[in-house]
Image: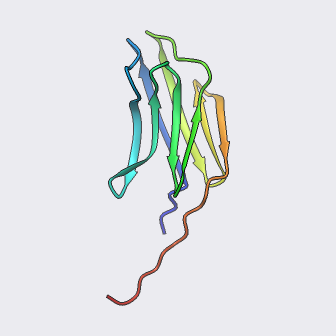
Amino acid sequence: MLNYAKATVEAWVFLKALPTGNALVAGFSQSNAWDKDLYVDASGKINWYVWDGSAHTVTGQTPLALNRWYHLVGTADGANITLYVIGVIVGVGTRIAIMAEISFTGS
């Protein structure tokens, strides 16, 4: 069984300029739909987005500075989603739904 509610995504990012919209930094998908991703918004804030049957987003409150390296990590443990910037927790979200295992029999 795959548990889509549990994951870790990490990346190093160096912004030379702010994006004009949401810019994907790192992420992965299941069934051709992005469901776990780190992205920077137009204000320079980092976001951790998790889809587990419904959408959950945690946003850091301080914009990333330009021309500086940052280590970003988003985790989901089935109960919480947590966003880290340079090892410091900058956001926590709760109430992640755990997707149930689906079994098929027959044709």
Quarter of the view holding residue 93 = top right
User: Above or below — where is 10 with respect to 43?
Assistant: below
Figure colour scheme: rainbow
Q: Nearer the viewer, residue 8 or 92?
A: 92
Q: Nearer the viewer, residue 70 or 80?
A: 80
In this figure, what is the number of numbered marks?
A: 0
Residue depicted at 52% across the width and 32% down the height: 47
The outermost residue toward the top is 67
* Residue 10 at x, y percent in the picture: 48, 35
User: Above or below — where is 61 with respect to 67?
Assistant: below
Quarter of the view holding residue 74 = top right
User: Above or below — where is 84 with respect to 107?
Assistant: above
* Residue 55 at x, y percent in the picture: 53, 48
Residue depicted at 32% across the width and 54% down the height: 32
Q: Is residue 24 left or right of residue 79?
A: left
* Residue 42 at x, y percent in the picture: 44, 21
User: Above or below — where is 29 with respect to 57?
Assistant: below
Quarter of the view holding residue 25 = top left
Q: Nearer the viewer, residue 52 or 73?
A: 52
Residue depicted at 60% across the width and 27% down the height: 60
Image quarter where the C terminus lies is: bottom left
The outermost residue toward the bottom is 106
